[in-house]
Amino acid sequence: MILPDMGGTTVGTALSAVLGLLLIAGCDCNQKYKYEIKEFQVPLDHFSFLINATFNIRYLYNDSFVDKSNARTPIFFYTGNEGDIELFAQNTGFLWEQAERQRALVIFAEHRYYGKSLPFGSSTFNTSLPEHLAYFTVEQTLEDYAMLITFLTNDRQMPVVAFGGSYGGMLAAWFRMKYPHLVTGALAASAPILQFSGITDCDIFYRIVTSVFQNAYNTNCTANIAKSWKLFETLGASEAGKKQISDAFHLCNALKTDEDLKKFLDYVEEVYSNLAMVNYPYNSSFLAPLPAYPVRQVCYYLRELQTTDADLLHAMSSALAVYTNYTQSAKCLDISVNSNADDSGWNIQSCNQMVMPICSNSSETMFRTSSWNFKDYAEKCYKNYRLTPKPYDIILRYGGRNLEATTNIIFSNGLLDPWSGGGVLQSPNDKVFVIILPEGAHHLDLRHSDPADPPSVRDAREKEAAIIARWIQDF
């Protein structure tokens, strides 16, 4: 999931990650999973009886596991989220593993306005045409998916299980809630459906990130990071200091202005959040090429409490390089590119419905203090996109904490994942399954099985597989 970059607002600094988010990722597996790429025509506006315009969304199709003699073949349907759908397909190994086990048809549907599913082509995000953004909503997207499933089933009775991680997990859950006649059940991994105004404290995200770093090696790690902000601000007050920072971090474009310094600080802050989310037990390249347990590696360089500015600057540079140049192939650091994510679409969604308040307190976390100010946030949204955000729209449509009537959803959350603070951690009834992964980072259970997976992750996958098998059997 991606937290919005609102061009300098203080509502929780620029953070580009996959809600996840997530995704939104570079493939770890070099096209391990195969599929056909198809297109499906959908209305531009599902809810108008006047607008008849259409466009095509992409979807990925694999029927290699299907038992052709089974008239009730299961469909495993990934609810695409904020990125190119092929990247999600290559990073959702659990779905593929279970599809082979259940002999299911595999579908990965691309979210409108992402990847190549652009309703207005190259002018989709033309800021001089804000009317092009009017159809960029959760509801339009879910209706796309509902039409696609109706087309695929073709009046046949087939169990459909929705899968999704981060924002995709939110979509999977909401898909089951709104279309229970089409969706038999849903696995919503690391889905922060409660990260909205009036439900979850806005500082929970950064408190969890801080906890992950505190426990990775020793507490000197977070102490050094907390001290570094003042160092950066002090150095950044002069031209010579800006040059020191630029040289220490090998920046491609040297810091020249106060705005440059702010972008650097936001970038560093975002890196810590990304690291916590992809703190996987093996090498990965989900957001950037990284070693196993990258937070521990970062904290290794910060294991000693630094007492001089020079030593702290050097230690911070070495620590950040775990994320920015683990392969040692980069000649310089470009702070305009934080990850493999494409956050242009998510910044727009966060200015209509997906308003997820984020803030931090320097006295309780390793981060700078940042406030949540909806008025400032809304003004930025209008300035950038001519959009007026509706902070309570999602709660009205999908119920917030009122999940008592919900059935057949698995909510899985890793306690090392900063987004778990906005996840469903207690079941409202015996038809909603809550699975906690104490050793899990951001939707680790959705990824492919690996010998390095912690016991809680392997156990979670076994439970998820059993529940999904039962849904299919009972269909």
Image (spheres, grey):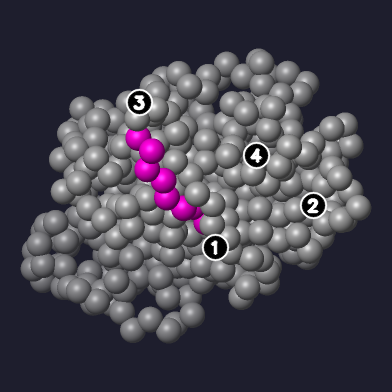
Q: Which mark is residue 391?
A: 3
| Residue density around tag 1, few if under 14, some if 14–19, many if 20 or more, within 10 Å | some
Q: Secondary structure at mark 2?
A: loop
Q: Which residue is mark 1?
A: 87
Q: Is residue 120 left or right of residue 422?
A: left
47 or 354: nearer the viewer: 47
Q: Is residue 190 left or right of residue 306?
A: right
Q: Secondary structure at mark 4?
A: helix
Identity of the amino acid at label 3? Pro
Instruction: Report, in whole angstroms, how far the alpha carbon at label 3 lies from the one at label 1.
Output: 29 Å
Q: Where residue 131 sits: x, y (%)?
A: 24, 40
Q: Quadrant of residue 188?
A: top right
Q: Which mark is residue 150?
A: 4
Part of the protein shown in magenta: 51-58
| Residue density around tag 4, few if under 14, some if 14–19, many if 20 or more, within 10 Å | few
Rendered residue at 65%/15% (across/down): 404
Q: Are marks 3 and 1 in contact (CB under 8 Å)?
A: no
Q: Earlier in the sequence, mark 3 or mark 4?
A: 4
197 or 308: nearer the viewer: 197
Q: Is residue 387 visible?
A: yes
Q: Are marks 4 and 2 in contact (CB under 8 Å)?
A: no
227 or 373: nearer the viewer: 373
Q: Considering only vertical position in the picture, is 457 above or below 377?
A: below
Q: Secondary structure at mark 3?
A: loop
Q: Which residue is mark 2?
A: 104
136 or 339: nearer the viewer: 136
Q: Earlier in the sequence, mark 3 or mark 1?
A: 1
Rendered residue at 18%/59% (across/down): 261
